[in-house]
Image (cartoon, helix red, strand yellow):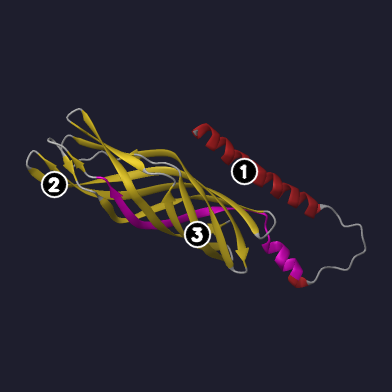
Amino acid sequence: MKKYIYIMFLFVFSGSIAAAQSSESSASQPNTTSAAPAPAHKKAAAIRAQPLKIGVIGGITTGTYQMSPIRSDDLRISNGKSKGIGYQLGLAVRLSIPEFIQIQPELLYSARDFEYSTFIEGKSQKATMTSKTMQLPLMIGFNIRALRLFGGPVFTLVSAVSDNKKVEGLKAKYDESTTWQFGAGFDIRKFFFDVRYTTPFKNTRNTFHYNGIAYTSTISKNDYWTFNIGFFF
């Protein structure tokens, strides 16, 4: 699955470069006709309408999180919740075909914290886990004047959870899957701003290991908002 995702990303990226090179070569060919020169405002618009843009993006995330509780003789774990503010940062490529239709693949590093309560051997403790992922969003959108609307899948390429150090002997594994993302934003010169809502494609699971036994919990809610700012070179 990951191999096909990488191939798709390379296909979109190479297609973007090919489109940009084609645009540059057509622009560099001399005009043999005797047409009158274009007005100044049309020249400025042509400069702004770049078919391919490459830049950086970063933002913060906040949302809701809930998993099914675990109740056994040796281990009890609460529903859990999202803790604090997460963040993401990475690279973005935007291809305009034509100018008002946009394809924007991204490569993002994301981190989020989660908190839950445990009850082990008569002792109650709070624990946290940090999910760190490398994601590949593939956004497709269009413009309505200054407003930019978009949406698409977000593929998880690599995911990891930091070991739980607060509860001795307990380790958590956070299951990431493909999610859907929808958002809106606007551009100001080379800067772009957007707000996104992300929801899972399907319910995922957490696996907790304690004393050599694996306990599984279903993640019933994992929706979050992202507020991004970016810059195209």
Identity of the residue drawn at 70% across and 44% down: 18
206 to 188, vertically: above or below: above
The residue stretch that appears in magenta: 42-68
Residue identifier under label 3: 183
Q: Earlier in the sequence, mark 3 or mark 1?
A: 1
- Closer mark to the observer between disc 3 and disc 1: 3
Q: From mark 2 to mark 1, how far is it between C-alphas? A: 47 Å
Q: What's the amino acid at mark 1? A: Val
- Tell me the SS state at disc 2: strand
Residue 125's label in the rendered image is 2
Q: Which mark is residue 12?
A: 1
**Above or below for 74 versus 203:** above
| Residue in the image at 53% along x and 37% along y | 5
Residue 222 falls left or right of residue 26 = left
Q: Residue at x 22, y 45 (%)?
A: 69
User: Between marks 3 and 1, how big is the CA–CA gap?
Assistant: 21 Å
Crowdedness near tag 3: few (<14), some (14–19) or many (≥20) residues, C-alpha within 10 Å: some
Identify residue type, mark 2.
Gln
Instruction: Tell me which label, 2 or 1, sits earlier in the chain.
Output: 1
**Picture quadrant where residue 224 is located:** bottom left
Q: Specify whether residue 37 is painted magenta.
A: no
Image quadrant for the C terminus?
bottom right
* First along the sequence among labels 2 and 3: 2
